[in-house]
Image: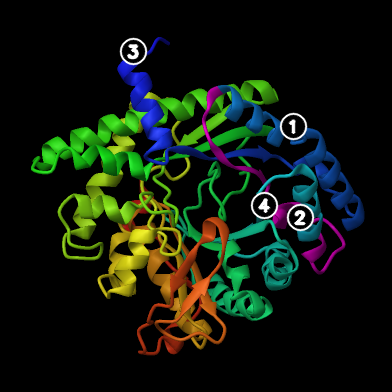
């Protein structure tokens, strides 16, 4: 593919001035052939396979960075949900599986490994129950393990027993990592309609419908989109939509090139390209600032949901023209701690939890990286999860909750998580009680449109 001098300069500007990067290359690895009746033997097989299949992932990523001049921020691995793998073993506690994965991650040199996961949207297997019970200790005892639990889907409804259990699990995980600000919860996601091919953490796992090994890529460029809009101050929404779509096309084309090259060198199939706009806490790398560039005084102002809806849709439309393998989430993330514009809006009172929830109806995921007061009850957290799961179920989209009830912190306090996780002000929770609602249990049925076939 030939590029004009203008396109080359434009691409260089994207990297150097507007913080465009490959946010993650994630190698998904199937562990289905590691299953054994012995937990010790299963873990031995897991470690052996990960080191064999993913041994050159980090080296390959660094070589591509050097040769192409494209920053690849994270090199990651995702695995088959461990609840499925460990369920046949004689173990009652799955924390040793997390430790095996963590040790493998350190040996491989990857940033994170995802898949300490369970899929319970319609019910619990024995392995699911054991895995969820192990999450608080497992995440507190490891550094690079990420965990996810899918508790709802548009086809099966919302498993409210699982929702209640996740509220309790999040509270325990926060208590177990209290000295680190409850950071274990930053590695734990509760899903509705979890995608099997997502390269982003903390929700990545290698789905059972995936192949033996697959390379998925996450590309991000909020700063590039914002820069493109800056030169169209007085444009109509029709023009803005076109600018976003064309810019997303360019970003995706670059991601496709890197992803296919990485897959080729690793000798595995190229899976999907997730073109989500994933912000960081660095100035100029913010989804919130894109919304403000459209004319809002601050993210969270009336009009924010409409602006985010257009942004998400145009990113998808531009991306699918550039790649035939778009997947994962693909749209726009609105995490609080990882977006300096969102942090600023929370600090000034421009955005609150209820408005964030409304915006999740049109964004890529949901309530992400939100610090809550340490005394927030498990039932309140479960109720927040239930609301978000309902949005995903009814709208037939992926939604997720990643909240951190920070021990010892109150509304307005600051908590620092470090690295890409950033930091955030603690947000207020509605004080009205939801305990009796959560205690009902059972399952909220799937919506009528789930019967499409």
Circle 4 residues within 10 Å: few <14, some 14–19, many ≥20: many
Label 2 – label 3 distance at C-alpha = 45 Å
* Residue beneath disc 3: 4
The reply to whether dot 2 and dot 4 touch (C-beta < 8 Å) is: no
Whole-percent x and y of residue 282?
A: 43, 54
Q: Which residues are magenta?
A: 68-96
For residue 87, say whether it is visible: no
Label 1 – label 2 distance at C-alpha = 17 Å
* Residue beneath disc 4: 81
Position above or below: 222 against 273 = below
Whole-percent x and y of residue 88?
A: 81, 55
User: Mark 4 or 3 closer to N-term?
Assistant: 3
Label 4 – label 3 distance at C-alpha = 45 Å
Residue shown at 69%/26% (left/top)? 266
User: Mark 2 or 3 closer to N-term?
Assistant: 3
Position above or below: 249 against 336 = above
Nearer to us: label 2 or label 4: 2
Position above or below: 387 against 255 = below
Which label was assigned to residue 56? 1
Residue 122 lies within the magenta run: no
Label 4 – label 1 distance at C-alpha = 23 Å
* Residue beneath disc 2: 102
Nearer to us: label 2 or label 3: 3
């Amino acid at each position: 593919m030939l590029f004009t001098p203008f396109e080359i300069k434009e691409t260089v500007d994207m990297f150097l001035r507007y913080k465009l990067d490959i946010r993650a290359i994630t190698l998904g690895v199937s562990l289905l052939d590691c299953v054994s009746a012995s937990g010790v033997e299963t873990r031995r097989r897991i470690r052996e396979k990960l080191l064999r299949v993913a041994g050159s992932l980090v080296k390959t990523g660094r070589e591509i960075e050097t040769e192409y001049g494209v920053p690849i921020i994270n090199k990651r691995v995702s695995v088959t949900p461990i609840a499925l793998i460990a369920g046949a073993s004689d173990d009652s506690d799955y924390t040793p599986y997390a430790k095996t994965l963590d040790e493998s991650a350190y040996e491989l040199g990857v940033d994170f490994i995802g898949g300490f996961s369970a899929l319970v949207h319609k019910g619990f297997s024995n392995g699911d129950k054991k895995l969820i019970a192990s999450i608080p200790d497992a995440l507190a005892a490891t550094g690079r393990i990420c965990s996810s639990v899918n508790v709802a889907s548009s086809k099966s409804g919302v498993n409210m027993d699982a929702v209640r259990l996740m509220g309790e699990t999040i509270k325990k995980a926060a208590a177990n990592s209290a000295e680190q600000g409850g950071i274990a919860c930053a590695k734990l996601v509760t899903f509705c309609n979890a995608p099997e091919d997502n390269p982003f953490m903390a929700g990545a796992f290698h789905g059972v419908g995936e192949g033996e090994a697959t390379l998925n890529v996450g590309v991000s460029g909020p700063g590039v989109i914002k820069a493109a809009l800056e030169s169209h101050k007085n444009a109509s929404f029709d023009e803005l939509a076109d600018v976003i779509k064309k810019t997303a096309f360019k970003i995706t084309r670059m991601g496709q090139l890197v992803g296919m090259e990485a897959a080729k060198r690793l000798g595995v199939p190229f899976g999907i390209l997730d073109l989500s706009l994933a912000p960081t806490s660095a100035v100029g790398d913010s989804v919130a600032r894109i919304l403000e560039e459209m004319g809002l005084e601050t993210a969270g102002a009336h009009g924010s949901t409409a602006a985010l809806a257009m942004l998400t849709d145009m990113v998808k439309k531009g991306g699918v023209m550039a790649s035939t393998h778009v997947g994962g989430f693909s749209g726009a993330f609105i995490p609080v701690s990882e977006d300096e514009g969102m942090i600023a809006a929370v600090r000034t009172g421009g955005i609150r939890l209820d408005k964030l929830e409304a915006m999740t109806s049109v964004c890529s995921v949901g309530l992400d990286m939100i610090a809550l007061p340490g005394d927030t009850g498990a039932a309140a957290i479960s109720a927040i999860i239930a609301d978000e799961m309902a949005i995903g179920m009814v709208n037939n989209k992926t939604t997720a909750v990643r909240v951190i009830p920070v021990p010892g912190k109150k509304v307005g306090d600051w908590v620092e998580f470090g690295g890409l996780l950033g930091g955030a002000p603690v947000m207020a929770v509605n004080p009205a009680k939801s305990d009796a609602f959560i205690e009902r249990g059972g399952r909220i049925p799937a919506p009528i449109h789930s019967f499409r076939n």
